[in-house]
Amino acid sequence: MAKAKGLGKGLKALISEEINFDEEVAKVEEKEPLIFELEINKIRPNSDQPRKNFARIALEELAASIAEHGILQPLVVKPEGKGYTIVAGERRFRAASIAGLKVVPVIIRDLSAKDVMEIALIENVQREDLNAIEEAMAYGKLMDAYNLTQGEIGIRIGKSRATVANTMRLLNLPKELQNQVLDEKISSGHARALLALEEPGQMIALGKEIEEKHLSVREVEKRVKAIKNPRKEKELPSANPFLVDLEDQLTHRYATAVHIKGTDQKGKIELEYFSTEELNRLLELMNITGRDYETRKLS
């Protein structure tokens, strides 16, 4: 049977005051929800967990910490069948299993499938645990299963609609490329650069080249431009190393192609966008959110 303990205030924003338990624990109402110690073999992962990959080395490091200090933040679980399904804390659960723990601290909540998916997504997004494809797939599930709009998803996770839309564009990539991002063989920056190509075969071929030759995002952008405009592409003079590095930093910052033309004394900076949503995302990153902008904001 689960044993109750007190709860720190750190989870108040996530956990409501009313908690429903199975036949082993009576329904209770407290100003703060209770933490219970639950046998680990009664807990199972969430099949709709947005995060697909868990780095083994990081898990082993967390397991070592848990073995020494215990689990400092309880898991959130929901009663399901004869056991409990994880709502939040699967990484802690996996590490606790590696550490050989028999019981773990939990908060038990009776939640809908929609609430479970949203909380799992929020937990991962806020901690930046998801890669871009995992995040895009989670958004897609919420839209398909619960008829949510991109704007409604943005409100729930604290991101703009444009940011959600830009992430979901990655689902337009061929499955082979999506798997490369999932496996961290290419970055989301590489993937966004490949979206400029319209032919799936060209995307896949260049994706393989990225992995084999370890091409930078800037190199991929050049390849994409050459593929799309083979006759217009000209050999460029040797670039200023400082400006090349600055281009790479800006490309990473804005997650889109950035070009600096000129010298370090005089020139111009160009940012590329491929949709209205992406333009809005870039404007928001530049804090162009004044009243006048809001009245004219593209949609």
Image: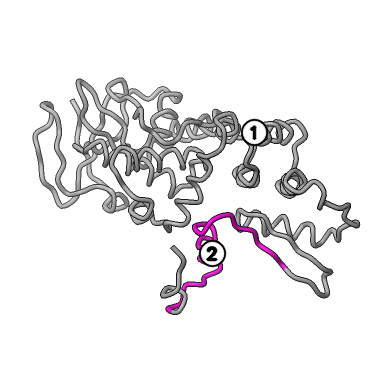
Does the magenta segment cover residue 12? no
Q: As displayed, is residue 12 above or below residue 265?
A: above
Q: Where is residue 15 in the image (x, y as percent from the top left)?
A: 24, 47
Residue pointed to by mark 1 = 185
Residue range in magenta is: 269-291
Answer whether residue 277 is magenta in the image.
Answer: yes
State the separation of the CA atoms marked 1 and 2.
27 Å
Q: In the figure, residue 83 lies in which quadrant?
A: top left
Colour mode? one colour
Give the position of the C terminus as an image quadrant: bottom left
In the picture, measured across the screen, residue 121 lies left or right of residue 79, that is right
Sequence-wise first label, 1 or 2: 1
Q: Quadrant of residue 116?
A: top left
State the residue position of label 2. Answer: 285
Crowding near pointer 2: few (<14 within 10 Å), some, many (20+)? Answer: few
Q: In the displayed structure, would residue 45 be above or below residue 125?
A: above
Which one is in front, 48 or 208? 208
Percent x, y for residue 147? 29, 44
Element at badge 2? helix
Question: Quadrant location of the N terminus?
Answer: top left
- Residue 192's x, y, as percent? 60, 46
Q: Measuring 69% from the left and 57% from the top, which residue is drawn there?
A: 249
Q: What residue type is labelled 1?
A: Lys
Graded by Cα atoms within 10 Å as few (under 14), some (14 to 19) or many (20 or more), the crowding at tag 1 reads some
Left or right: where does residue 275 sit relative to residue 231? left
Residue at image x 20%, y 32%?
A: 3
Q: Which amino acid does label 2 sit on?
A: Leu
Give whichever of 176, 17 is nearer the camera: 176
Q: In this view, does 294 lie above or below 63?
A: below
Comparing 88 with 102, the one in front is 88
